[in-house]
Image: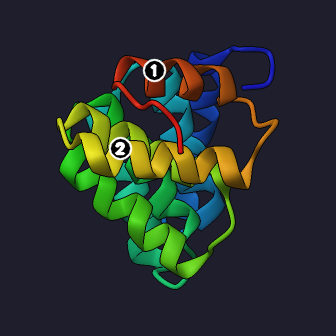
Amino acid sequence: MAKNKFKDAEVLLKTALSQIPDDYAGLLLMASCCVSQNKLSEAEKYAQDAHSVYPEEPLALSVLGVIRTKKGEYDKALNNFSAYEKALPGNPNTIYNKAVCYDKMGRKQEAIAEYLRYQNEAPSGEFNELVTSRLTELGYKGP
């Protein structure tokens, strides 16, 4: 997958998962591989399987959130990101993802609150320019 050979990786991962179908890491890798190929329904199935195999490990929730965001299922994605953040707080990307979900759902005040929280938590974060731009577009004037 590191060389963007997703079809080759998919074949290898399917072979591995046929031998060890409850391999949490393998299921998440397969979900990521499917996302990279825009096979979102397949990706969602693998991420759900990973969550079922190891429900106390929150990474599958974040992966599900990303997949569901890509599918336009913002309410489901928001639930996944919120559950992930509750289990494993402190990831500013999760805050950003929650902001995007609120934004896409038209929930302006919640989106602004999460974008501001992202800026506070990650003042030099990778999404900071996007967040600043989006806050302006939403009409946020500052404190």
Q: Which residue is mark 1?
A: 136
Q: Say if 123 sits above or below 128 in the image.
A: below
Quadrant of the image containing the N terminus: top right
- Which of the two residues, 72 or 39, is positioned nearer the viewer here? 72
Q: Is residue 75 visible?
A: yes
Q: Say if 51 sits above or below 41 in the image.
A: below
Which of the numbered marks, if any, corresponds to residue 10?
none
Alpha carbon distance from label 1 to label 2: 12 Å
**What's the amino acid at mark 2?**
Ala
Q: Earlier in the sequence, mark 1 or mark 2?
A: 2
Q: Which residue is mark 2?
A: 111
Q: Is residue 141 left or right of residue 104?
A: right
Q: Position of residue 29 (x, y in %)?
A: 61, 45
Which color mode does the image show?
rainbow
Taking the spot 70% from the left edge, 14% from the top edge, the residue there is 4
Which corner quadrant of the image does residue 140 belong to? top left
Q: Say if 84 sits above or below 28 in the image.
A: below
Q: Say if 115 sits above or below 86 in the image.
A: above
Contact, mark 1 vs mark 2 (Cβ under 8 Å): no
Mark 1 Cα shell of 10 Å, populated few (<14), some (14-19), many (≥20): few
Q: Is residue 110 left or right of residue 6?
A: left
